Each structure stands twice: as structure tokens, then as C-alpha cells.
Image: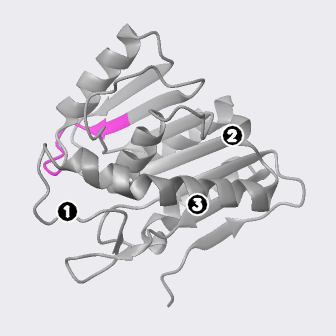
């Protein structure tokens, strides 16, 4: 089985574009259960599970930026170096689907969520909505996202990315007047379970 980007649904007249971004050391196939659920929830949406560009430095899967040796001090630099390609990827799928930023949703898990969240700090809006699962900002948000709603979903038992990052980000974004929602899930670790899938699909049905 190939681990390239997967175009899950491609309606002729797309009303929405949903791009999914996997975690470090993973592949687009890891997010297919969520992508399939999203496609069923909104048959008018282009749904794409995107492959990160670089081979993971742990020898399996793919990554946007290396995590070997990552620290609080150098994480933002690594994310910033990867961001132009992330933006180009989103813009390319917007061109292919004919859907602009005002109808684009970015759904990220773990490292994919980090990239999606940090894209909200750009001057130009990339998407109308970011749904971040088990993620974090590379550093606390500096500016209020420009017309981008942020939905943070985090398991309370996540031992990979501490849920306190999502709590702090939600508080900071709310203090800026941003459109932000936080769901903390009991007895959920660093994973996407049925409850997470239901939350993502429910959020998309609101749009």
C-alpha cells in the first residue's frame, strides 16, 4: 500500500475543503477512519488526507519538521522553516478543489495540529477553521487568528503532548477575542477515538 496523499472524496461541485494532517512518523492512511467519517458527514466536501513532505528522522513515516533534539527554544524555528511548504500545500489543494480559505477546514493530529495551529498566526488567512487534535502551538499564540475559528480537542491522559498546552492556548485565544472552543476528554490519551471523531464531525456539521 502506498503512503502518498489520499483524496478521499472529490465531489463535482465542492462546497468545502477539508484537509487532514497526520502526526510525526505516521502516514495519511493513519487518518483514513477520521477522513471517511468526515466525508460521510459532509458529502459536499473535498476531503484529503495529506502526506507530510519529509521522511521521518526516526526511520518510519513522514514529518513536517524533525523532532529529534527538539526543544522549547528551537521548536518554533523548525515550524517556521516548514511553514512555507505547508501553506503552499493548502493553497494547492484550494486551487485544485476551487474552494477558497473561507470554506477550508484544516484538521491536524499531533504534529499536523502544530502546523495547522501555527498557520493561524500568519498575516493572511489560510482557512476558516482549524481543528487541532492532541496538538499545541509552537509557542503561545501571539496574535488573534484572522477570521479563523480554532477548535482544540485534547485527551486528559495524553502523555505525548500535555493537555495543559491546549488549556493555556484556549485561555490566551479567548482573552484576545478569538473564536475558540476547547474539548478536554477524560480517559483519552494521544489518540483519535470514536469520541474525537464524533466531535470533529459535529463541528463540521455546524458550518
Q: What range of the chain is rendered magenta?
A: 153-160
Which residue is tagged 1?
67
Q: CA distance from mark 3 to mark 1?
A: 21 Å
Q: Is residue 80 above or below residue 128?
A: below
- Is 89 positioned to the left or the right of 13 in the image? left
> Circles 2 and 1: CB distance less than 8 Å?
no
For marks 3 and 1 on the same chain, the one whose residue lies earlier in the sequence: 1
Q: What crowding class fits label 2: few (fewer than 14 Cα within 10 Å), some (14-19), or many (20 or more)?
A: some
**Mark 2 falls on what kind of element?**
helix
Provide the secondary structure element on which disc 3 rests: helix
Quarter of the figure with the C terminus: top right
Q: Where, by quadrant of the figure, is residue 128 drawn?
A: top right
Question: Residue 79's spot in the image, x, y percent?
Answer: 33, 51
Q: Which residue is mark 3?
A: 89
Coordinates of residue 181 in the picture (x, y in percent): 44, 23
Asked if the magenta segment contains residue 198, the reply would be no
Say left or right for 31 vs 70: right
The correct choice, above or below, for 147 with respect to 71 in the image is above
Return the residue at label 2: 101
Total marks placed: 3
Amino acid at each position: 500500500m502506498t503512503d502518498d496523499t489520499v483524496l478521499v472524496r472529490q465531489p463535482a461541485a465542492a462546497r468545502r475543503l477539508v484537509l487532514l494532517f497526520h502526526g510525526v512518523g505516521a502516514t495519511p492512511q493513519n487518518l483514513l477512519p477520521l477522513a471517511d467519517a468526515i466525508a460521510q458527514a459532509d458529502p459536499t466536501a473535498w476531503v484529503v488526507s495529506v502526506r507530510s513532505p519529509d521522511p521521518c528522522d526516526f526511520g518510519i513515516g513522514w514529518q513536517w519538521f524533525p523532532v529529534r533534539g527538539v526543544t522549547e527554544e528551537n521548536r518554533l524555528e523548525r515550524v517556521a522553516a516548514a511553514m512555507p511548504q505547508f501553506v503552499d500545500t493548502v493553497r494547492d489543494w484550494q486551487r485544485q478543489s476551487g474552494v477558497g480559505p473561507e470554506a477550508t477546514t484544516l484538521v491536524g493530529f499531533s504534529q499536523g495540529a502544530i502546523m495547522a495551529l501555527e498557520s493561524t498566526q500568519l498575516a493572511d488567512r489560510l482557512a476558516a477553521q482549524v481543528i487541532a487534535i492532541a496538538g499545541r502551538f509552537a509557542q503561545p499564540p501571539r496574535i488573534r487568528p484572522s477570521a479563523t475559528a480554532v477548535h482544540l480537542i485534547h485527551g486528559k491522559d495524553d502523555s505525548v503532548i500535555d493537555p495543559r498546552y491546549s488549556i493555556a492556548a484556549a485561555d490566551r485565544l479567548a482573552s484576545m477575542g478569538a473564536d475558540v472552543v476547547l474539548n478536554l476528554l477524560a480517559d483519552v490519551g494521544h489518540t483519535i477515538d470514536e469520541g474525537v471523531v464524533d466531535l470533529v464531525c459535529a463541528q463540521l456539521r455546524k458550518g
